[in-house]
Image (cartoon, grey):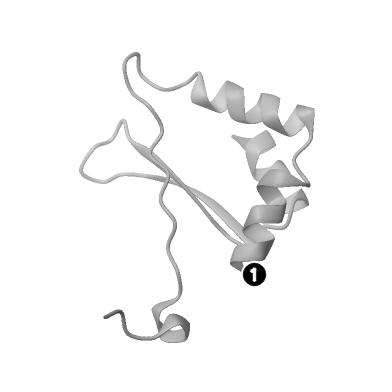
Amino acid sequence: MDNVARSRRRTGALTWGLYQDGNEPGRFIENYLVGSWAEHLAQHHHRLTTTDRGFEDKARALLLPGTSAEVTHAFDASVVGPVH
């Protein structure tokens, strides 16, 4: 995951962390912050190299058989405002 961390930072992540779930010790959560949604899209569509994709593939290979990575996106609620 060190290579994934370097890749995320190189492509625009401001912060990066890997966390172990306290309720499910075999579950890990990667979390990183980018400056905007546009930065996030650029990170995945324009800045990611073949080498970076290889690092992500190696990380996915660590998943338990029959499972897949869950991807979620969170937005700063103090900036977005109320949802109706």
Q: Quadrant of residue 73?
A: bottom left
Residue nearest the observer in this picture, 39 or 56: 39
- Amino acid found under the numbered disc labelled 1: Gly
Where residue 33 sits in the image (x, y, percent)? Answer: 57, 62
Where residue 69 sits in the image (x, y, percent)? Answer: 41, 33
- Residue at far top of view: 65
Left or right side of 26 for 55: right
Mark 1 is surrounded, within 10 Å at the Cα level, by few (under 14), some (14 to 19) or many (20 or more) other residues, namely few
Left or right side of 30 for 64: left
Residue in view at x 61 percent, y 30 percent? 56
Left or right side of 74 for 83: left
Residue in view at x 39 percent, y 86 percent? 81
Left or right side of 46 for 73: left
Image quarter where the C terminus lies is bottom left
Q: Quadrant of residue 57?
A: top right
Image quarter where the N terminus lies is top right
Residue in view at x 64 percent, y 44 percent? 5
| Residue under label 1 | 35
Determine whether the residue tagged by mark 1 lies in a helix, strand or loop.
Answer: loop
